[in-house]
Image (tube, helix red, strand yellow):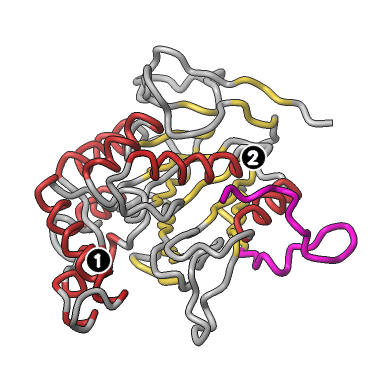
């Protein structure tokens, strides 16, 4: 039997000073009012160790049925909560009705999870200013943090451009899509969008950097920090990449995780693990051996134990990949 506890921090900030309160709730956050970018604050009661899962890109080019099956497999694995690294809808539009349809579809499938789910936006979710506004009204902050016990989670927005730059990228992207579709002459590799560094590596603005630097100062007592983002900001050089925040992370135990490339890889930087996840339903390159559907299961013991599970290897009690019973919204 599962025992669910309601863990709610109301009207208090995360960053208390002085002696640590041993009675503090496990789940703590700073958002006092308005929509929140997660589905629930009811967690399964756990011991010292806890396990959480991470899903990767559904889009672009979502293949029907994969994410719905992953939801059922996550329920089999029963992590304490599930995180995302973005590209949850196809997006890329200013049509509010279409955005509502796509988010309703994603949310209706995600509601079948038996544990909380934490949203994070990717380039498909936050393509233009109207999509930013839609996100803010429906899910709250585009970047945020929370603690679960003495583990800190930084949920970053790698689409953190000025509005002017966002519009430039959006317009260049639209032209490139038309070239790919054959509506305009030219080659995709010669489009303005193809040459933009933001296409691959994203951007972090000064306000977001300051926010997370303050979060780290106010949470020096944590034993581990997870840094999640959609695009690999750590590959971008300069002030708009991850380097300034990495300087603030120096001396801490942390793990960085992102998606976007639809191809799994692992790297070591400054002695820490950096992961680029594959897909959980997104388009794949059939010639890439690291393009596979999976979820990442993280057991947070003294240090994180991360296991990447291919969806076609998570079997039900009959020894087969479960057929999803979750309907796909057309």
Asked if the residue under mark 2 is in contact with the one under mark 1, i.e. CB atoms within 8 Å, the reply is: no
Q: Which of 86 and 54 is in front in this view?
A: 86
**x, y percentage for residue 272?**
41, 62
The stretch of residues the image draws in magenta is 308-330
Q: In which quarter of the image is residue 47?
A: top right
* Residue occupying the far right of the picture: 318
Q: Looking at the picture, does residue 232 appear above or below residue 204?
A: below
- Is residue 314 rendered magenta in the image? yes
Q: Quadrant of residue 66?
A: bottom right
Judged from the image, the secondary structure of the residue bearing numbered disc 2 is loop
**x, y percentage for residue 70?**
65, 55
State which quarter of the image contains the N terminus: top right
For the residues labelled 1 and 2, the Cα–Cα distance comes to 33 Å
* Label of residue 64 in the image: none
Mark 1 and mark 2 lie on one chain; the one further toward the N terminus is: 2
Q: Residue at x 37, y 20 (%)?
A: 34
Q: Mark 2 points at which residue?
A: 80
Q: Which residue is drawn at 40% across and 57% down?
A: 256
Task: Left or right? Give the position of 92 relative to 295.
Answer: left
Q: Mark 1 points at which residue?
A: 199
Give the number of the mark in front: 1 or 2: 1
Q: Which residue is drawn at 25% across and 56% down?
A: 242
Q: How crowded is mark 2: few (under 14 residues within 10 Å), some or many (20 or more)?
A: some
Task: Left or right? Give the position of 186 relative to 298.
Answer: left
Q: Looking at the picture, does residue 330 appear above or below residue 149?
A: below
């Amino acid at each position: 039997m599962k025992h669910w506890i309601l863990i709610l921090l109301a009207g208090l900030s995360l960053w208390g000073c002085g002696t640590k309160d041993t009675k503090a709730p496990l789940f703590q956050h700073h958002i006092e009012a308005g929509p929140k970018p997660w589905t629930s604050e009811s967690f399964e009661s756990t011991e010292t160790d806890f396990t959480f899962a991470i899903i990767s890109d559904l889009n672009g080019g979502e293949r029907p049925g994969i994410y719905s099956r992953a939801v059922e497999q996550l329920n089999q694995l029963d992590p304490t909560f599930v995180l995302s690294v973005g590209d949850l809808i196809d997006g890329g539009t200013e049509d509010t009705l279409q955005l509502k349809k796509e988010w309703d579809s994603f949310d209706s499938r995600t509601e079948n999870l038996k544990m909380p789910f934490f949203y994070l936006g990717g380039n498909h979710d936050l393509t233009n200013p109207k999509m930013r506004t839609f996100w803010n009204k429906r899910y709250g902050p585009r970047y945020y943090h929370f603690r679960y016990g003495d583990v800190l989670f930084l949920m970053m927005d790698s689409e953190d451009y000025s509005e002017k730059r966002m519009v430039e990228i959006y317009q260049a992207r639209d032209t490139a899509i038309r070239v790919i579709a054959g509506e305009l002459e030219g080659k995709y590799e010669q489009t303005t969008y193809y040459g933009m560094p933001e296409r691959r590596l994203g951007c972090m603005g000064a306000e977001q950097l300051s926010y997370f630097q303050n979060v780290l100062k106010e949470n020096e007592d944590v034993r581990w920090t997870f840094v999640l983002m959609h695009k690999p900001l750590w590959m971008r050089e300069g002030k708009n990449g991850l380097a300034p925040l990495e300087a603030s992370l120096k001396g801490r135990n942390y793990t960085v995780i992102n998606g976007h490339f639809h191809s799994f890889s692992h790297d070591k930087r400054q002695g820490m693990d950096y992961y680029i996840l594959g897909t959980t339903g997104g388009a794949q390159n059939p010639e890439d051996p690291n393009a596979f559907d999976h979820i990442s299961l993280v057991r947070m013991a003294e240090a994180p134990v991360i296991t990447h599970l291919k969806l076609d290897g998570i079997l039900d009690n009959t020894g087969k990949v479960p057929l999803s019973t979750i309907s796909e919204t057309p």
